[in-house]
Image: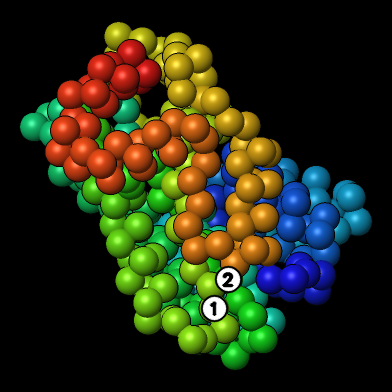
Amino acid sequence: MKSFKNKIAVITGAGSGMGREMAYQLSDAGALVIISDKNKDTIAETATNIVNKGNQCEYFVVDVSDESAINNFVATVLDKHRYIDVLINNAGYALGTIDFNDLKVEDFRNIVDVNLWGVVLHTKGFIDSMLNRPEASIVNISSLFGLLGVKQQVAYCTTKFAVRGFTEALRMELEGTNITTTCVHPGGIDTNIVRNGVHYDNKETVDELVEKFRKNAGRTSAKAAAKQIIKAIKNKDERLLIGIETYLADSMQRTMPVGYTPIIKRIFQDAF
């Protein structure tokens, strides 16, 4: 995508972290950003910051675990604008470390609703309008955990592997069209993902868990990660790895598809 000027970009989960930073950067580049988040205060703050710079922004409070809320959001946007040029499915969350046997079914179901169905439903809702544009981009945020399976992260890995599979299969279907799909695999990004997660272990406070994550895993700033994603959209990259840890994980998965397990257990035992 040569330019974002006068383009319309939808970004989910833009109340903080990478979503917020992508909204800032795309609006600075001349796009109208239409942003959503479950948190009404943080999404309003993102929008206010954008408008105060003289850039264009519309914001919505949307719970991406709610199919009807997503459908209403899509319908409202298309009724007003008729199309979008960029869709960034960024909204998602994680669970704290928990053995699969102790994981509540309702928590597993909810993370699938947000991390996977949120991606599927937004894509399904907007894709027809995007096919009629000169060029368009769908960006889905997977994870390092969409490359490797990690203990005590069964639910999160399930959703992020699914996002990867969805995006790669969709890429093949859209070959020869105007739409580029990009699957993003961030590693440790310094965002609110730990603070906003569901935690089973009460031995540590949320603040302590956040600090541990930042120390051991949060190597890349949200601003830096967003910059790489925006660059990938411009270059029409179909796959993006963020962080040296993700490149290492990708290499291990390809060269040792089973043998990586004991290595990853040692690496991650103190990270969360």
> Is residue 120 positioned above or below 176 on the image?
above
Label 2 with label 1: CB-CB less than 8 Å: yes
Nearest the viewer among 175 and 71 is: 175
**In the rendered view, does 7 fall on the left or right side of 162?**
right
Residue at image coords 37%, 53%: 114
Nearest the viewer among 43 and 188 is: 188
Q: Position of residue 94 (x, y in %)?
A: 37, 37
Could you give the CA–CA distance between mark 2 and mark 1, rounded to whole angstroms?
5 Å
Q: Position of residue 204 (x, y in %)?
A: 36, 10
Q: How many marks?
A: 2
Residue at image coords 45%, 17%: 216
Q: Is residue 73 visible?
A: no
Res 168 quadrant in image = bottom left
Q: Which mark is residue 179?
A: 1
Q: Amino acid at mark 1?
A: Ile
User: Which residue was labeled with disc 2?
Assistant: 137
Q: Amino acid at mark 2?
A: Ser
